[in-house]
Image (cartoon, rainbow, N blue to C red):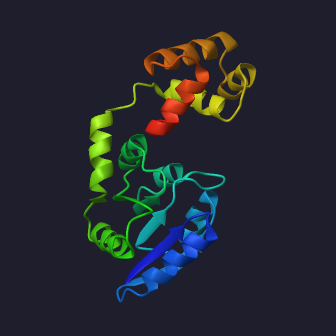
Amino acid sequence: MIRVLLADDEHLIRAALATLLSLEPDIEVVAQVARGKEVAAAVAEHRPDVVVLDIEMPDMDGLTVAEGLRDQVVLILTSFGRPGYLRRALAAGVRGFLPKDSSAEELATAIRKVHDGGRYLDPDLAASAMMAGDSPLTARERDVLSLAAKGAAVPEIAASLHLSEGTVRNYLSSAINKLGATNRITAIRTAQEMGWI
């Protein structure tokens, strides 16, 4: 029996997935959580074989959660099939990546494959990620853009990252140029659409 933990903040989706997976003779959903910060404790308590994560969750996103679960078999199931997300997931050691519009049969197949040590990637997403290439942003540029995307002003970003305001402006300017954007808003939008922040 493959023991599965489901992490998704949408109760209806999570419950539906649990019900569909319970119809599989070799899969058992042993735990369900709604927040990113709840995953580690649930993993420790229930010891699942496979952790199925959504990306967009309160407190901590699924990609950040996956980075902390390097000893676990992780599969991402998300509405946000952005190329940058797939690359970040693979860098975090995620074994599978599927869009939420996948069938229940495909999800069950993916769970079995990653449990057996393989990888399961949505082919359309994999092709998009290959065509999109790597993020041109440095880690600091991503940090600055991510905070700007949350509405933080330059002084707040500077304080949060322990940088001078001038350095923050330089990072913003560099990110805008690298993304071929005309301003901070379009740079943020481009980076989000690509899954780079």
Q: Is residue 136 above or below residue 27?
A: above
Tell me which corner region of the image, top left, top right, bottom left or bottom right, holds residue 38: bottom right
Position of residue 33 measured from the top left corner of the image (x, y, whole percent): 60, 69
How many marks on residues?
0
Nearer the observer, 162 or 197: 197
Q: Which residue is drawn at 59% across and 33% down?
A: 146
Give the percent coordinates (x, y) of residue 43: 52, 69
- Residue found at x 55% / y 70%: 13
User: Is the N terminus in the top left, top right, bottom left or bottom right quadrant?
Assistant: bottom left
Residue at image coords 41%, 62%:
74
**Is residue 157 in view from this perspective?**
yes
Above/below status of 11 relative to 92: below
Q: Is residue 169 left or right of residue 123?
A: right
Q: Is residue 118 above or below residue 24?
A: above
Q: Is residue 197 visible?
A: no
The residue drawn where x is 30% and y is 57% is 121
